Image (spheres, grey):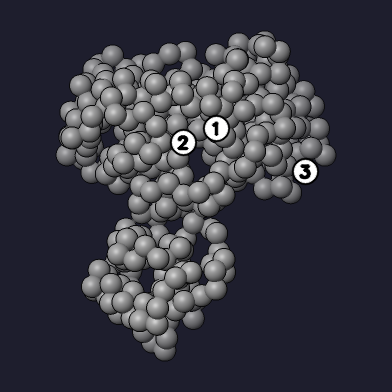
Amino acid sequence: MSDHHFDRLEGQDPDQREAELFARLPGQISHAIANAPAWAKHLAGVAPQDVRDRAALASLPVLRKADLMAAQQKAPPFGGFAAGDPSTFARIFMSPGPIWEPQGEGADPWSAARAFHAAGFRSGDIVHNALSYQMTPGGFILDHGARALGCVVYPAGVGNTEAQVDAIAALRPVGYAGTPDYLKVLLDKAAELGRDVSSLTRALVSGGALFPSLRAEYKSRGVDVLQAYATADLGVIAYEAIPDDGLIVNENMIVEIVRPGTGTPVADGEVGELVVTTFKQSYPLIRFGTGDLSAALPGRSSCGRTNRRLKGWMGRADQRTKVKGMFVDPKQIAEVLARHPQVARARLVVERKGDQDAMRLLYETEGADADFSDALALSLREITKLGGQVERVEGGSLPNDGKVIADERDYES
């Protein structure tokens, strides 16, 4: 293995990776069921030894944040989903919701080290970490990852910009870790104060959108910036190795992209909700719905890493929308479509007609008779309890953006 890769896993044959992950999965499911009462209930009736491929995994229910939050409110702090004794956890964090998260096991519990390696960091580098260390795990996710790689971390946290600039000038870190936009705040403040922060030549950013114009500006100022996609519960899910070449899925986790509101995987290239399965022992997460939209990219990264690639963060999957005082959920649209498998793709458009809300279900199909739209409209009314217009559209005309429900009402007029 060359220094180009963090370890052998990054360059292994994709089929071998898939086989190894699914060989481990039955044991992880058994562990969760045996050691976490909420997992035993959530996966009741599941035979762990049968879950050995993606099709079998897709038959398991998705656990979404709303479900986790409700469970935690009933049985704080972890809702019965932790598989270890909370008194043994190194740290407990709180994310908005609130949702409580335990720190996992190991020196790099959120698997961030390989993202730092891909971004050009190496053992002995000093890293200026400007993510928050307070309550939420963001600062610790990057801190542990950098230190697992052998880096030295300055825990700057957030705020106190002038003091942070002074620290950079004194410590001469080679790199920055934090949100994409705060790096610009630091660079601009350094220029204003006349401080030399030219030691910063690389950055790993997370927790916000890295716009192309911002990346280009950093490049012009001598800083190469790559991004990692991470969540508080799962850690680093995917990371960049080359700008604008997709995000490479992290090792030791299984990533699916499903139709929003369902657990049904979509084809590669289709936009859907990111669902992740991890192999953590203390806090196992099996088919955990992130609520984020993304899509799988075809082929492999030109950097030589062989894992699947994601297009990146593409919005939120929660499209629950209130129409005429009643909520319409993507799950309901999925139920409508389940009655009519001839539909290849559909989208519910919510709009205003005069002073009233109105719904239009647009659908694509190759085989349907003249009465098909009427049958679809009847199913829509029966399931949502709301009437709506149904329109057949040309195949391939609906946007590939993961939206099942598109709210097109103008709230400004």
The answer to whether residue 56 of the structure is visible from this angle is: yes
Q: Quadrant of residue 31?
A: top left
Mark 1: few/some/many CA within 10 Å (<14, 14-19, 20+): many
Q: Which residue is mark 2?
A: 255
Residue located at (60% from left, 15% from top): 8
Q: Amino acid at mark 1?
A: Val
Above/below status of 338 relative to 275: below
Disc 1: which residue: 249
- Quadrant in which the N terminus appears: top right
Q: Earlier in the sequence, mark 3 or mark 1?
A: 3
In this view of the protein, which residue sits in the foreground, 405 or 143?
Answer: 405
**Nearer to the camera, 297 or 178:** 297
**Kind of element beneath mark 3:** helix
Q: Horizontally, is 372 left or right of 293 in the view?
A: left
Circle nearer the viewer, 3 or 2: 2
Does residue 296 lie above or below 25 as drawn? below
Q: Residue at x 64, y 38 (%)?
A: 299
Name the secondary structure under disc 2.
Answer: strand
Q: Position of residue 132 (x, y in %)?
A: 50, 31
Residue type, mark 3 in image: Glu
Please name the amino acid that badge 2 sits on.
Val
* Residue plotted at (46% across, 20% down): 20
How far across and how far down the image is residue 265, in percent?
42, 46
Q: Residue furthest bottom?
A: 354
Nearer to us in this view, 308 or 110: 308
Q: Which residue is more in the foreground, 187 or 26?
A: 26
* Image x and y of residue 65, in percent: 33, 43
Q: CA distance from mark 3 to mark 2?
A: 32 Å
In the image, is 188 to the left or to the right of 129?
right
Asked which secondary structure carries label 1, the reply is strand
Q: Label 3 to label 1, Cα distance in Å? A: 27 Å
State yes or no: discs 1 and 2 in contact (Cβ < 8 Å).
yes
